Amino acid sequence: MGLKIAIQGIRGSNHHQVAREYFGEDISLVECFTFHELVDKLLQQEADKGVMAIENSIAGSIIPNYALVYRNNLHIIGEHYLNIHHNLMGLKGQTIEDIREVRSHPMALLQCREYLKTQPHMKMVEDFDTAETALQIQENNWPGIAAIAPAVAADLYDLEILASDIQTIKNNATRFIVIKTKNKALPEEEINKASIRFITDHKRGSLATVLNVMSDCNLNLTKIQSLPIIETPWKYAFFVDVTFEKFEHFAKAKSLLDIMSEDFKVLGEYKNAML
């Protein structure tokens, strides 16, 4: 097999789908229960690269993952956006009326709440992972129980989709980052996005000054996320994503921000997947 790719979840999950779309079919999956385990697999060299969800268009940022990337000195080498489609699935031959219990990840249940309100006979039960629930239904031959999972899980685990695209908001996308322990050296002309992390002085206008520098260097700020610094109460680090037309613009901003802010670090330089 090809590259060993660590994902959170199992075959049939959204992370699995992203890994296939980004790297192709010739990969070996390293399935992880948690994002912490995913990071450990990379650090222990049991996986070559990892796929990690970082933000959702509805639920917002997955804040702990920012800290995982920074604290473990990982590098973001790419990104991928996935449109999320939630499907209700169960054993073949069943109907909607046969389902008495629906299981899935808490976020999937939340995002399908309006549909589930129309099915009062179904009890909602939170589970660890969308695809894991689908697998359990197959392995245990569970009648009357359905999973909310990606369509690929129905194919992998021989289940029947009873209702498609049941998410409340149809335009639902998640951004995933591709990470590894060493930075990938892309040619500068191919790099047009970067993720950085820094701390500002606890003074009035310090963050605004840093943002003005980015603007003066022709950087487009696409994301800013603050995260408390555990060791220093009431002090915050900022995780920022920027896009740019020329790498030299970012190079100039890096040199200035390294001087103007504390603990400045580039988390990744890569291609903008939104183009």
Image (cartoon, rainbow, N blue to C red):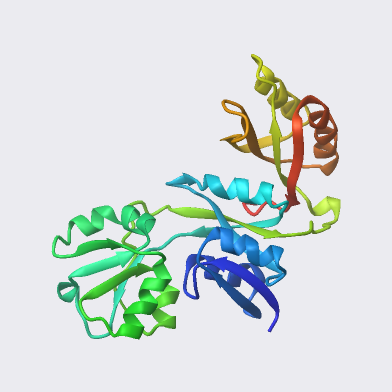
Q: Name the side, left or right, on which 33 lies relative to 161.
A: right
Quadrant in which residue 32 is drawn: bottom right
Residue in the foreground of this view, choosing between 1 and 24: 1
The quarter of the picture where the N terminus appears is: bottom right
The vertical placement of 149 against 90, above or below, is: above
Quadrant in which residue 273 is drawn: bottom right
The vertical placement of 155 against 168, above or below, is: below
Q: Residue furthest front?
A: 231
The vertical placement of 254 against 187, above or below, is: above
Q: Name the side, left or right, on which 33 lies relative to 68.
A: left
Tell me what residue is drawn at x 63 percent, y 79 percent.
Answer: 28
Can residue 210 be seen in this snapshot?
A: yes
Where is residue 10 drawn, in percent x and y? 49, 73
Q: Name the side, left or right, on which 193 lies relative to 126.
A: right
Where is residue 83 drawn, in percent x and y? 48, 59
Can residue 150 be seen in this snapshot?
A: no
Give the number of callouts.
0
Tell me what residue is drawn at x 83 percent, y 27 percent.
Answer: 259
Residue in the foreground of this view, choosing between 13 and 213: 13
Quadrant in which residue 113 is drawn: bottom left
Q: Name the side, left or right, on which 161 lies relative to 93.
A: right
Where is residue 231 drawn, in percent x and y? 62, 34
Where is residue 212 drawn, in percent x and y? 71, 23
Tell me what residue is drawn at x 64 percent, y 63 percent.
Answer: 40
Tell me what residue is drawn at x 64 percent, y 14 percent.
Answer: 204
